[in-house]
Amino acid sequence: MFLPTTREEMDRLGWDSLDIILVSGDSYVDSSYNGSAVIGKYLSKYGFKVGIIAQPDIDSNEDIKRLGAPNLYWGISAGCVDSMVANYTATRKRRQKDDFTPGGLNNRRPDRATISYTNLIKRNFKQTPKPIVIGGIEASLRRTVHYDFWTNKLRKSILFNSKADILSYGMGEKSMLELAHTIQNGDDYSNIRGICYIAKEAKAGYLELPSFDECKADKHKFIEAFEKFYVNNDHITAVGLSQKQDTRYLIQNPPSIIPSTEEMDEIYGLEYERALHPYYKKMGEVKALDTIKHSVTTHRGCYGECNFCAIAVHQGRTITERSVDSIVKEVEDISTMKSFKGYISDLGGPTANMYGIECLKKQKLGACKDIRCMYPKTCKVLNVNHNKQLELLDKVKKVEGVKKVFIASGIRYDLIMDDNKCGSLYLENLVKDHVSGQLKIAPEHTEDEILGLMGKQGKDVLKRFKDEFYKINDRLGKKQFLTYYLIAAHPGCNERHMKDLKNFASHELKVNPEQVQIFTPTPSTYSTLMYYTEIDPFTGKSMKVEKDTARKYKQKDILIDKDAKNGYMGNSYNKNHKSSKDDTVHSDGKNKKTNKPKNNKFKGTNKFKKKK
């Protein structure tokens, strides 16, 4: 069942009012890939009456008023993507397309959507004020003082700028449910894990970060603030944080405890329609649905911690996985859909092959503060073994009606090469049954100096993986190839590095790379910290950062053909093969065909970690 979006739907349910109204920058696709749908369905399961208003018109009061005022609180999300990333390219050009909007035109998501929607509610419900809770990735990654690429300056917490009451950060099921019970009972919410709020004074016992004024005046203070913020994202080891902004304080409680396997099964086992709500379908199709309709999430979190990625801050560094039975049950449900043709589009998570691989020490004691799981080398304590994922793939393949199971999520090829137990078997299984002509991997660069700044392993492991991949293809009689995602103009990268990358790609990888994206600084990543401060936070030394748009394009053009359109991210193709598809990388991590590649520039997702 869909959550209600109109008064008529409420009437059919016999509801005079709603307890919680969720407002989203995405259209309402009832799917586990839509954060608002997940939160709404989860709250509904526990007895709360929840409705959704998707992409309300901020210049009118009709959309925002159609469900009335909630009894408990408003929940606002900019959508699955930061609204500024969704609306603008890496060179600050306005995007024409939006895969999360009916009809595909980028005409319904406002800039800084979290702030716009909060203001819209405040204007229209002065007589019936209820707490406003902001969440989703935009709020989560902007919850402390942060650098904003689009204005080229530091901004206060989005909680201050939006004037909302509460911020729910990370994966918000637990915090949003506890908030609902707390507000319903009239209790104090100030100690709920996973939330931020504003207070007149710093909170006793909490770690105080350098203030907004200090960060503005001294880039080293901003680095200090970010590093303290970053290491306090683990659900076991994190302490609460305070940060002065003007005369008041942002209070960040420790993160929510990550879900258990049983709780993950509960969240993903909710009855999602896997469809666009009929109210919005009248406005047109949502392209993102093509990718997620027959896809299955196996886990959350990522311990890869690339410096340009924010997954560790938002989802965490510890893998939280579903049971095999839960995943198989979802695949069985998908197999009964009329639209299903036998193909599971994706079986994965932020990094597909981290399912079933986690450090027992981390699960018990929390993430290490000074050691990364996979950089500069994969930690031996991680005990890499792809056996559990092989068992999962085997069971999913046997579901009646399933012809093929694809892994379209990213994989860490270095994790495969580090698996001495069954890494080769896993890769052979991947090549044999789970690749659709090409396997997409993300080395991002090949020069060790830049890879070090990115927090990624060196190019030798890439070369070994590439050789093994093609060796298996030859043995199996397959004609499949690797697609490489690469980044231009990352902090520290210059034209010499790009020429060396081009040379390595041509002579060692035997490809002409075209999957090239210009680095976009987005909040809460180490790479963005480097971009703004022009300081390597791990050494304290000054570094060169390319900020001129023309020279950023020049770095990109070194890798691609001169007649390639700016912003195009086509195939990296093996010279012995030819691709008939144009693939573009979207902010949800999926790959979609497009006839207008010029509108699909890098949307700037991020990853990270710190070496001492």
Image (tube, helix red, strand yellow):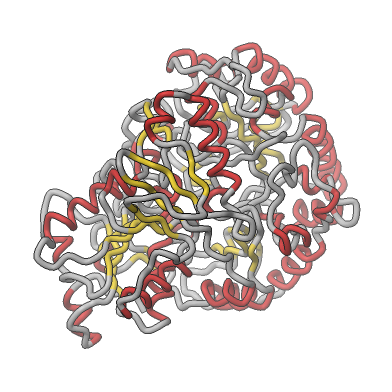
Q: Quadrant of the N terminus?
A: bottom left
Farthest residue toward the right? 420
Q: Left or right: 411 with respect to 294?
A: right
Image quadrant assignment for residue 414 = top right
- Residue 590 seen in the current view: no
Counting labels gives: 0
Q: Give the vertical position of 12 relative to 163 (above or below).
A: below
Where residue 481 appears, as percent x and y from the top left, is 71, 40
Kindly indicate the quadrant of the structure image that contains residue 246. Answer: top left
Tell me: 340 left or right of 143.
Answer: right
Q: Residue at x 37, y 43 (%)?
A: 157
In the rendered image, the vertical position of residue 535 relative to residue 62, given as above or below = above
**Residue located 75% across and 35% down the image:** 457
Q: Position of residue 375 (x, y in %)?
A: 74, 39
Q: Is the residue 349 above or below the residue 561 in the image?
A: below
Would you say 227 lies left or right of 167 here? right
In this view of the protein, which residue sits in the foreground, 374 or 352?
A: 374
The residue lying toward the viewer, choosing from 311 and 440, is: 311
The quadrant of the image that shows the C terminus is top right
125 vs 573, nearest the viewer? 125
In the displayed image of the protein, which residue is found farthest to the bottom?
Answer: 14
Examine the rendered structure and indicate whether residue 442 appears above or below residue 326. above
In front of the other: 266 or 249: 249
Q: How far from the left and from the top, in percent, is residue 472?
A: 84, 46
Q: Residue at x 70, y 31 (%)?
A: 574
Residue at 66% over, 55% down: 352
